[in-house]
Each structure stands twice: as C-alpha cells, then as structure tokens.
C-alpha cells in the first residue's frame, strides 16, 4: 500500500481482481472506495508528481464511490 507525501492524499490501495481503489485523504480520512478503476489509473496515481491533481483530473467524478 503506497503512502504519499501529498497534501491531499495520504495513502492508496488497489485490488486488481475487483478493480477497487481505496483512498485515504489527509483531511477527511477514509478509506473511500472507487469502483471499476483500471490498473493504469492506479499506476498513474502512484507515479503522479501531484496525487491531488491526478485525483481531480482522472478519478474524482469518474467512478462510483462509497
């Protein structure tokens, strides 16, 4: 489970079998689970220079969340 130095996202976890991405935010905690997320989106989040910006562009409002 990767931990980030991001001011927005503390850590993330991905299950490739179910395509569920779990994200813990620095402010609101978590986990928040995002469904139907492809592996390349998780990889992009992990490799982004800004996890918060990547989240806003490619994850937020793109996948159902619980």
Image (cartoon, rainbow, N blue to C red):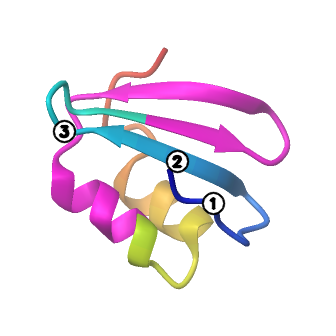
Residue at image coords 77%, 33%: 29
Please tell me which residue lies in front, 14 or 56.
14
Residue 8 lies in the magenta stretch: no
First along the sequence among labels 2 and 1:
1
Q: What distance separates the C-alpha of mark 2 from that of mark 3?
A: 13 Å
Q: Do the residues labelled 2 and 1 touch (CB within 8 Å)?
A: no
Judge whether 65 appears above or below 1 on screen: above
First along the sequence among labels 1 and 3:
1
Local packing at callout 3 (Cα closer than 10 Å; few below 14, some 14-19, many 20+) is: few
Position in image of residue 47 (x %, y %)? 41, 78
Position in image of residue 20 (x %, y %)? 31, 29
Which label number is shown at residue 3?
Answer: 1
Q: Are marks 1 and 3 in contact (CB under 8 Å)?
A: no
Q: What distance separates the C-alpha of mark 2 from that of mark 1?
A: 7 Å
Q: Where does label 3 land, which residue?
A: 16
Q: Specify whether 35 is left or right of 52.
A: left
- Callout 2: SS: strand
Q: Where does label 2 land, which residue?
A: 12
List the single residue furthest toward the right.
27
Q: Specify whether 5 is left or right of 19.
A: right
- Callout 1: SS: loop
Judge whether 7 appears above or below 59 on screen: below
Residue at image coords 32%, 56%: 42
Residue 44 lies in the magenta stretch: yes
The magenta stretch spans which residues? 22-45
Position in image of residue 43 (x %, y %)? 29, 65
């Amino acid at each position: 489970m990767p931990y980030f130095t991001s001011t927005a996202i503390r850590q993330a976890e991905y299950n490739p079998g179910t395509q569920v991405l779990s994200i813990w935010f620095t402010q609101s905690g978590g986990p928040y689970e995002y469904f139907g997320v492809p592996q390349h989106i998780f990889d992009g989040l992990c490799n982004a220079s800004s996890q918060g910006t990547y989240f806003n562009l490619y994850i937020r409002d793109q996948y159902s969340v619980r």
